[in-house]
């Protein structure tokens, strides 16, 4: 899963009005270059939640084998075993 972390204001938010200093030091809104990464991460989480509801989370989508616990701890949205990754 891609890293979607970023700087957070001391109040836990992004500053007044949801905007704050950017990594490059400028003031402004959202970093639109990161939007596709954040959207992909959200889609992965939503897919994992749907698999959880269906009772198939934690198994390979290709062969049905159980996924390793360490893999699921590191990447909860994992979809495939090492053979099919």
Image (tube, grey):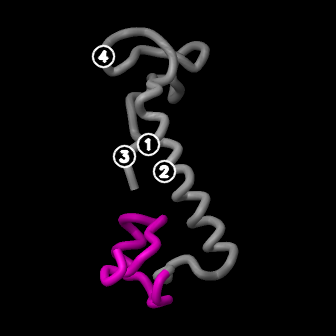
Q: Secondary structure at mark 4?
A: loop
Total number of numbered labels? Answer: 4
Q: Which residue is mark 4?
A: 24
| Left or right of residue 43: residue 2 | left
Q: Which residue is mark 1?
A: 37
Is 73 in the magenta?
yes
Instruction: Report the residue at 56% width, 77% height from top.
Output: 57
Q: Which residue is mark 3?
A: 3
Residues under numbered marks 2 and 1 in contact, where contact means CB atoms less than 8 Å apart: yes
Q: Nearer the viewer, residue 27 or 10?
A: 27
User: Label 2 vs label 1: CA separation?
Assistant: 6 Å
Magenta residues: mostly which secondary structure? loop
Residue extent of the magenta highlight: 62-85
Q: Nearer the viewer, mark 1 or mark 4?
A: 1
Instruction: Report the residue at 56% width, 66% height from top.
Output: 48
User: Label 1 vs label 4: CA separation?
Assistant: 18 Å
Mark found first going from the N terminus, 3 or 2: 3
**Quadrant where the image shows the C terminus:** bottom left
Mark found first going from the N terminus, 4 or 3: 3
Q: Which residue is mark 2?
A: 41
């Amino acid at each position: 899963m891609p890293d979607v972390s970023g700087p957070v204001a001391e109040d836990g938010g992004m500053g007044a009005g949801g905007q704050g200093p950017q990594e490059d030091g400028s003031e402004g809104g959202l970093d639109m270059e990161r939007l596709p990464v954040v959207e992909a991460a959200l889609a992965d989480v939503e897919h994992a939640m749907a698999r959880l509801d269906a009772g198939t989370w934690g198994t390979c989508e290709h062969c049905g084998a159980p996924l390793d616990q360490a893999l699921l701890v590191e990447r909860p949205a994992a979809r495939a075993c090492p053979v099919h990754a």
